[in-house]
Amino acid sequence: MPSRRRTTPSRAFRRELGARLPRDYKELAAAYGPGEFCDFLTLYRPGALSEWVDLTGPVPARLRTQLDAVRAAGARHREGPPCATEDLLAMGVTGSGAYLFWMTRPREDPERWPIAVSERLGAPWFTYRGSLTRLLVEVLGGTLRVPLFPADLLSGGPSFTASRLRGRVPVTEEDDRPPVDTGTVRAWARANGTDIGDATGSSEAPRSSPGSPHRRT
């Protein structure tokens, strides 16, 4: 009886997205496994236990949808992505809510894919003309400063913490509840003897974006 060919993560990626993974990324993922660099940067992986950081899961597509929505809203005062939204593939997220993307052109040559970093899908964008491994080597070696990363990123030295996740974590449905009126909350608090100042001037409570790793790795 012929043996069945095992589906590897890279084959799953190619089947799902019609492209090969960059060679350096495959070597990096094999060497380190799932986890965080400097307790800050998480790389997406094909078939990751957490769908929030699954390269072939729903989050990369959701991020492209959000970017399209920003463009459709006519946000001309904001700097747009450095390439077509359809060519952006999310492959990493930071603890501050910045996303790392491959710019997947030319599609047939992933070794030439540049990298783009965006802070919460808005301006400014940082672009890097090199591989992911080279970016990490320069950032963790202190020779490259990414403006969207904290200045004290290396205060504890370069490090990698392996993920302790053992079970599957699915992506939950989008939060469709109405925004919280913080003015009402402050009024209630004052009526009960507590004064809560308005530090942001916003009438809506912030919501987390898909892919933020603080509760999903």
Image (cartoon, grey):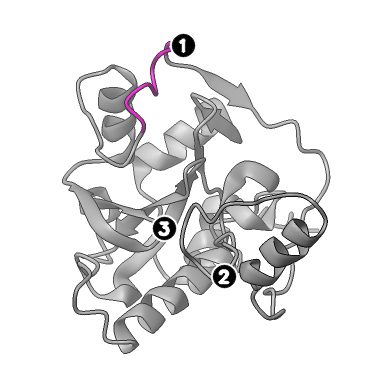
Q: Residue at x 19, y 64 (%)?
A: 82
Depicted 184 relative to depicted 142: above or below: below
Q: Nearer the viewer, residue 188 or 26?
A: 188
Mark 1 and mark 2 lie on one chain; the one further toward the N terminus is: 1
Residue 37 in the image: x percent, y percent? 49, 28
In space, the residues marked 3 and 1 are separated at their CA atoms by 25 Å
Alpha-carbon neighbours of circle 2 within 10 Å: few (<14), some, or many (≥20)?
Answer: few
Tell me whether the residue at label 2 lies in contact with that at label 3, contact meaning CB atoms closer than 8 angstroms.
Answer: no
Q: Which numbered dot is residue 156?
A: 1
Image x and y of residue 105, in percent:
22, 65
Q: Which residue is mark 3?
A: 120
Residue under the image location 64 percent in, 51 percent down: 196
Quadrant in the picture for residue 188: bottom right
Q: Residue at x 67, y 57 (%)?
A: 51
Magenta-drawn stretch, dominant element (helix, strand or loop): loop
Say above or below: 113 vs 26. below
Q: To which quarter of the image does residue 81 belong?
A: bottom left
Query: Viewed as shown, does residue 162 lie left or right of 105?
Result: right
Q: Which residue occupies the foreground of this view, 156 or 57?
A: 156
